[in-house]
Image (spheres, rainbow, N blue to C red):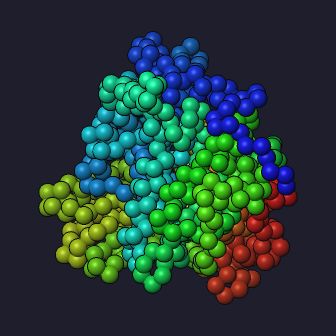
């Protein structure tokens, strides 16, 4: 392939998208956000600010359950905001958890939601409470900077220290990479924290460059990075723009395999959009990894598509110019070549529930949290239990106690001493929360669902609110065929954007319209294969009929130890999807 002509740094391309114009005129993400949030007439904000607010970690939404009623009453939609807290590696201390619980109760809908990227989301925040919410985060040394928008987002890492002897060496890199790639504009601090604008002058009296990495136009689209520690791929590492796979030599971190070009979003009706898994391009040492990530982001900044946002993700840049061109470009920018990648073996993308111990004698408890929604219900009071436990940890000086979010929307209670285990168990039992997930099916343990309706503006169908009842109707089939405890990965999303990672599941359900879903089969249990469309636009009855027949066939014909995703491919039910551009074939 002919080497493309490099673009001048951050030069606008011909016919840039409207979002590029908005960024260009935004004064480094300031726009008219101050004026929008001071406007008392509406619960909404200015059109351009709808794009800019994403860089500050928030989206404007409306309660879609009320949309029609409010239209009939000639009222504007019930506008509200979702805000996402940046939590590298999903790591929170007890004081931070209590503050987040307070924000949920005081300003949001009284729930916290663990995302599939190890962050916390709040929903239902009114326009005039958003600034108060951000200031409350700041009191707990938390922020929402770059939690959304065309920048590098929350950096993920395997959260469970009991899974690897090198975990303590690897985990800090989530924070290091996140900080290294943060935007440098002071807009967030000025607008939300009332910190005055600072302007440093350099020689000649000119203002210092505000965004040394991003420039005034930032990236063409969002950018995602994750770290996994084999043999566990619990961060679904290959679906990220940059996938870092930690490599151990004995009990020492020797470095990271580097893979690039993952991403799951697509658009129905456009065959030029597709999910893609990252390709491994080499190996770097721990001392090199920050520079590697920086230069990869810079290449996407310079070569990503700024005309068609549907084709602006890094995966399309890789496929447009070619992987060999990319490796050459990266090595030139680094000034040295990546080493050859090391052998890697993954066994699962799932979480390991229950108690597990590390070599230092401390215990870690992974709790199942249904689709990441931390709340109190009639059946159990998880939100209260976690708040009480956090307060107990503070009162009794459990200084190392941590609450760590997983990429599967679950929660790890980390660094618990032997003598404290009974206290943790008793407190959870007091609030009717079971400490392991053995009482539910393997399918349910491995299920993921995005928020979808009633708040997500992209949603075409239900997901989080529907998945529990859908599994209720499917589980009798599991029992009938001896599959109740079998680990099968099922994921549901309300649209094809990929938030619930449906196209990387053994069974994927993607909403097409209210009550109707596309059914995808054959994703890899270890996270190293995409699935394939099997049936389109099915209602619940048709979905259940298809899955009941497939599960019965799997039970009768599977090989010993064979996972469901592998079975449907071996049986010829669907073809394996190993290359993203073949997803629609």
User: Residue 566, position in %: x, y?
Assistant: 71, 75
At 39% across and 38% down in the image, what residue appears? 109
Looking at the rendering, in which quadrant would you find the C terminus? bottom right
Q: Closer to the camera, 581 or 339?
A: 339
Q: Quadrant of residue 5?
A: top right
Q: Closer to the camera, 112 or 550?
A: 112
User: Residue 73, position in %: x, y?
Assistant: 55, 15
Please tell me how many numbered marks the rendered image carries: 0
Q: Is residue 234 left or right of residue 373?
A: right
At 35% across and 75% down in the image, what residue appears? 355
Looking at the rendering, in which quadrant would you find the N terminus? bottom right
Q: Closer to the camera, 40 or 224?
A: 224
At 60% across and 33% down in the image, what residue appears? 217
Q: Quadrant of residue 85?
A: top left
Q: Which residue in the rendered view is the most extreme toward the bottom?
A: 560
Q: Is residue 128 left or right of residue 457?
A: left
User: Residue 45, position in %: x, y?
Assistant: 50, 21
Q: Is residue 81 above or below residue 553?
A: above
Q: Is residue 172 visible?
A: yes
Q: Is residue 169 left or right of residue 580?
A: left
Q: Is residue 294 above or below residue 365?
A: above
Q: Is residue 484 left or right of residue 571?
A: left
At 51% across and 69% down in the image, what residue appears? 285
Q: Is residue 409 visible?
A: no
User: Residue 261, position in %: x, y?
Assistant: 67, 56
Q: Which residue in the rendered view is the most extreme toward the left?
A: 396
């Amino acid at each position: 392939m002919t080497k493309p002509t490099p673009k001048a740094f951050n030069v606008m391309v011909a016919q840039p998208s409207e979002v590029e114009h908005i960024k260009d005129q935004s004064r480094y993400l300031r726009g008219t956000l101050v004026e929008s949030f001071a406007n008392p007439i509406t619960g909404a904000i200015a059109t351009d600010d709808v794009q800019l607010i994403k860089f500050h970690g928030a989206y404007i939404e409306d309660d879609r359950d009320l949309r029609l009623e409010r239209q009939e009453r000639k009222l504007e939609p019930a506008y509200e905001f979702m805000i996402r807290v940046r939590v590298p590696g999903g790591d929170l201390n007890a004081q931070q958890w209590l503050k987040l619980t307070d924000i949920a109760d005081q300003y949001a809908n009284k729930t916290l939601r663990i995302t599939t990227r190890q962050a916390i989301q709040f929903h239902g925040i009114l326009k005039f409470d958003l600034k108060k919410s951000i200031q409350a985060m700041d009191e707990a040394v938390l922020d929402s900077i770059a939690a959304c928008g065309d920048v590098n987002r929350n950096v993920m890492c395997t959260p469970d220290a009991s899974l690897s002897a090198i975990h303590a060496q690897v985990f800090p890199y989530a924070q290091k990479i996140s900080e290294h790639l943060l935007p440098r504009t002071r807009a967030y601090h000025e607008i939300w924290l009332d910190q005055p604008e600072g302007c440093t002058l350099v020689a000649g009296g000119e203002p210092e460059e505000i965004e040394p990495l991003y420039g005034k136009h930032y990236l063409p689209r969002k950018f995602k990075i994750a770290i996994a520690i084999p043999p566990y791929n619990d961060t679904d590492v290959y679906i990220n723009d940059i996938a870092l796979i930690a490599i151990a030599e004995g009990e020492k971190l020797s470095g990271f395999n580097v893979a690039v070009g993952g991403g799951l979003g697509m658009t129905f009706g456009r065959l030029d959009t597709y999910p893609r898994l990252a390709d491994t391009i080499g190996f770097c040492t721990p001392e090199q990894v920050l520079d590697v990530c920086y230069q990869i982001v810079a290449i996407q900044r310079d070569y990503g598509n700024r005309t068609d946002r549907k084709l602006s993700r890094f995966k399309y840049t890789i496929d447009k110019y070619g992987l060999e061109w990319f490796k050459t470009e990266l090595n030139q920018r680094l000034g040295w070549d990546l080493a050859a990648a090391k052998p890697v073996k993954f066994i699962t993308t799932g979480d390991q529930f229950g108690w597990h111990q590390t070599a230092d004698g401390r215990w870690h408890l992974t709790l199942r949290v249904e689709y990441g929604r931390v709340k109190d219900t009639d059946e159990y009071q998880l939100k209260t239990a976690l708040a009480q436990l956090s307060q107990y940890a503070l009162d009794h000086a459990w200084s190392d106690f941590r609450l760590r979010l997983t990429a599967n929307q679950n929660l790890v209670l980390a660094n618990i001493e032997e003598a404290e285990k009974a206290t943790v168990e008793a407190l959870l039992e007091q609030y009717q929360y079971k400490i392991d997930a053995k009482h539910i099916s393997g399918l349910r343990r491995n299920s993921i669902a995005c928020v979808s309706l009633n708040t997500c503006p992209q949603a075409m169908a239900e997901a989080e609110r529907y998945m529990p009842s859908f599994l209720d109707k499917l589980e009798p089939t599991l029992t009938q065929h001896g599959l109740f405890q079998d680990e099968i990965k099922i994921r549901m999303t309300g649209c094809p954007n990929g938030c619930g990672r449906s196209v990387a599941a053994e069974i994927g359900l993607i909403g097409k319209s209210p009550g109707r879903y596309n059914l995808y089969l054959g994703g890899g249990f270890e996270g190293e294969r995409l699935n394939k469309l099997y049936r389109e636009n099915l209602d619940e009855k048709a979905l259940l009929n298809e899955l009941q027949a497939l599960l019965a066939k799997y039970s009768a014909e599977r090989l010993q130890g064979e996972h469901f995703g592998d079975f449907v491919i071996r049986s010829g039910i669907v073809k394996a999807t190993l290359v993203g551009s073949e997803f629609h074939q």
